[in-house]
């Protein structure tokens, strides 16, 4: 089945492709006819015209090798989607330096490395789409309400995660300006809480804060990512698109 968005023959590199949101994105891209390069810590299963790559995305040399391999295997990279990431829970007061660095190593450094690595091949082609996955937690100061229930703080996202995602939003804006005249758009999608085994353990009060009255779904994130990868979205760049059921509006 083809989607209404034209992704035919586009070469898409998706990081975190084995994860919940990453696999929804790759499924949507495959339905649109894209050719997929799937990257994750362990090689995701691939089918048809797709290929898998295993690496640590926080390692600069491995990210460069990944991009070289994709260009070698597919001839070019039309789209980069950075869906790899890790969570971090608990209070600001308890974040260790090791935890801060661990989260920033993949959630910010990893995104920086992947974005930087695709610039040259995209510039050479005069076309590109970069979509980074940010988060509502970069904007709203976090969902926990410890003044009501201290347990909420221990069970939901913390500042290390939010600060890294805020960095992702900011680098998206800077790169969008730098690349706009090269036919390359750079945007981010900032999801709210997406239903998963992990987020289902979040306090029910979190769901009550979402005007839509429910958690989001991975395919709802994937739909926005897919559109931002199309040729039709050419005049949209430097945008942080909220997909959060109204949890945060700006
Ligand atoms: N799930 C949510 O509610 C939610 C909300 C907002 C934003 N996000 C963001 O969306 C993205 C995907 O989240 P998800 O819920 O699908 O998580 P997930 O854990 O299901 O997937 C993340 C993937 O990233 C990969 N990964 C982590 N570190 C890596 C590394 N160093 N090298 C290579 N691969 C690595 C993991 O192996 C995993 O497959 C993340 O950036 C996350 O922060 C998620």
Image (tube, rainbow, N blue to C red):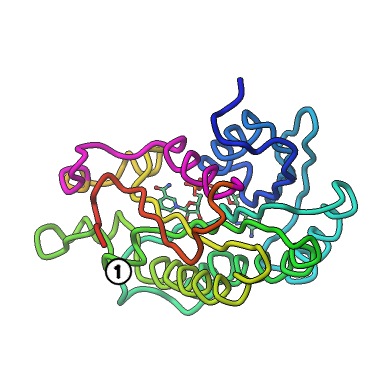
Q: What residue sits 63% from the left and 71% below the top?
A: 181
Secondary structure beneath label 1: loop
- Which quadrant holds residue 66? bottom right
The spot of residue 176 in percent (x, y) is 55, 70
- Which quadrant holds residue 149? bottom left
Residue at which label 1 appears: 91
Examine the rendered structure and indicate whether residue 239 appears above or below residue 36.
Answer: below
Q: Viewer-proximal residue, 1 or 97?
A: 1
Report the quarter where the C terminus lies: bottom left
The spot of residue 249 in percent (x, y) is 24, 58
Q: What residue sits 31% from the left and 56% below the top?
A: 156
Q: Is residue 232 magenta?
A: no
Q: Viewer-proximal residue, 5 or 92?
A: 5
Instruction: Give the residues drawn in magenta, as a range.
Output: 207-231
**Mark 1: few, some, or many residues within 10 Å (few <14, many ≥20)?**
some
Left or right of 246 on screen, residue 69: right
Left or right of 143 on screen, residue 86: right
Examine the rendered structure and indicate whether residue 156 appears above or below residue 37.
Answer: below
């Amino acid at each position: 089945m083809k989607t209404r968005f034209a992704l035919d023959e586009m070469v898409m590199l998706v990081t975190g492709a084995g994860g919940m949101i990453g696999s929804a994105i790759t499924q949507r891209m495959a339905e649109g006819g894209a050719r997929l390069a799937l990257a994750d810590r362990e090689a995701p299963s691939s089918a048809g015209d797709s290929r898998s790559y295993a690496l640590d995305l926080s390692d600069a040399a491995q990210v460069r090798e990944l991009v070289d391999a994709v260009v070698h295997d597919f001839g070019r990279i039309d789209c980069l989607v950075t869906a790899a990431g890790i969570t971090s829970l608990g209070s600001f007061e308890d974040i260790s330096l090791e935890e801060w660095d661990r989260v920033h190593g993949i959630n910010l450094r990893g995104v920086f490395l992947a974005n930087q690595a695709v610039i040259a091949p995209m510039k050479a082609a005069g076309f590109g789409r970069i979509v980074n996955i940010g988060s509502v937690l970069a904007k709203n100061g976090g969902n926990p309400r410890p003044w009501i229930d201290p347990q909420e703080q221990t069970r939901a996202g913390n500042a290390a995660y939010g600060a890294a995602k805020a960095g992702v939003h900011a680098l998206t804006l800077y790169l969008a300006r730098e690349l706009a005249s090269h036919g390359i758009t750079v945007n981010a999608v900032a999801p709210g809480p997406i239903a998963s085994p992990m987020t289902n353990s979040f306090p029910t009060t979190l769901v009550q804060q979402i005007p839509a009255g429910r958690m989001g779904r991975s395919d709802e994130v994937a739909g926005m990512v897919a559109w931002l990868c199309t040729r039709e979205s050419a005049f949209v760049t430097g945008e942080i698109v909220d997909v959060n059921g109204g949890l945060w509006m700006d």
